[in-house]
Image (cartoon, rainbow, N blue to C red):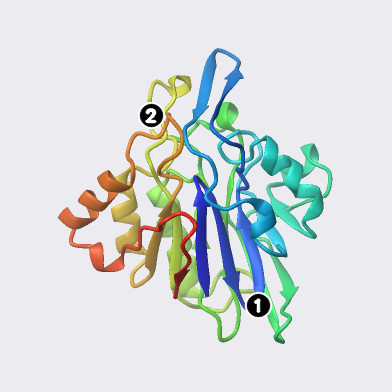
Amino acid sequence: MKITHVGGPTALISLGSLAFLTDPAFDEPREYQLPGRVMKKLTGPAVQPADLGPIDAVLLSHDQHKDNLDDAGRALLPSIPLVLSTPAAASRLDGVRGLETWESIELPRPDGGTLTVTSLPARHGPEGAEPVLGAVTGFLLSGTDLPTVYVSGDNASVDLVAEIVTRLSDGTIPGVAARSVDVALLFAGAARTTLLDGAPLTLTSEAAAEATRLLAPAAIVPVHTEGWSHFTEGPDHLTKTFTTAHLTDRLHVPTPGAPLTF
């Protein structure tokens, strides 16, 4: 499999001869005026949509926030054969297939067999933040003879990671055989806004390290740690935290635009 980080939460995952794009954000640097605050994008995409090649499916953790689905990303969605997200996103966006938590969908693979995409629980911010920040989802990609890939989405809860790992190892996720995670895309960066008094809305570096221990022996690819002004712990901070935690052998910090191969 290959992972190419485009920037922010956006990554191209090539797995089982299928191409998946996470949370499309392709706008150039700009400011977004929102009720009571401004969001600022600092860097543009390392790869343009036209240079990604055919995309089989978008894995959209949520549609409510510009840093996960910006204007260019939203314009891209109608050209993608399958967009998977939350049921709430499906109610707002035409053509989106909403998955309930733990619900799976099987996709045919061009090289034979199928690949299963499963919706996983995620919580954007502290417990009780859902009325403010809305529902989000993570994803699991799995299949016979394929690496198992966990895409966290904008999840800030280590407890939910522990639940996912337990259910995955116990074989209690419907339609998914017992297994461990081989590669995890962790949305980190400790995003903070004034909406919730500065509480982290995504994994802090310390929480990402804790999740990494739970996800052993998975290789960890951190994304959504940079490119926006509200992210407070960038790649250097995360790498330093993983070094202190003796986890650097598991950490694969991507260079935007350069594929990582597993």
Q: Nearer the viewer, residue 210 or 192?
A: 192
Q: How many marks?
A: 2
Crowdedness of circle 2 by 10 Å Cα count: few (<14), some, many (20+)?
some
Q: Nearer the viewer, residue 240 or 43?
A: 43
Asked if one can make out residue 247 in the rendered structure from this viewpoint, the answer is: yes
Looking at the image, which residue sits at the far top?
Answer: 36
Task: Identify whether 230 is placed above or below 163.
Answer: above
Q: Position of residue 254 (x, y in %)?
A: 40, 58
Q: Nearer the viewer, residue 120 or 46?
A: 46
Looking at the image, which residue sits at the far right?
Answer: 94
The amino acid type found where label 2 is placed reads Ala
Task: Identify whether 254 is placed above or below 203.
Answer: below
Q: Nearer the viewer, mark 1 or mark 2?
A: 1
Residue 199 badge: 2
Q: Secondary structure at mark 1?
A: loop
At 44% from the left and 75% from the top, the residue drawn is 262
Q: Position of residue 228 (x, y in %)?
A: 46, 34
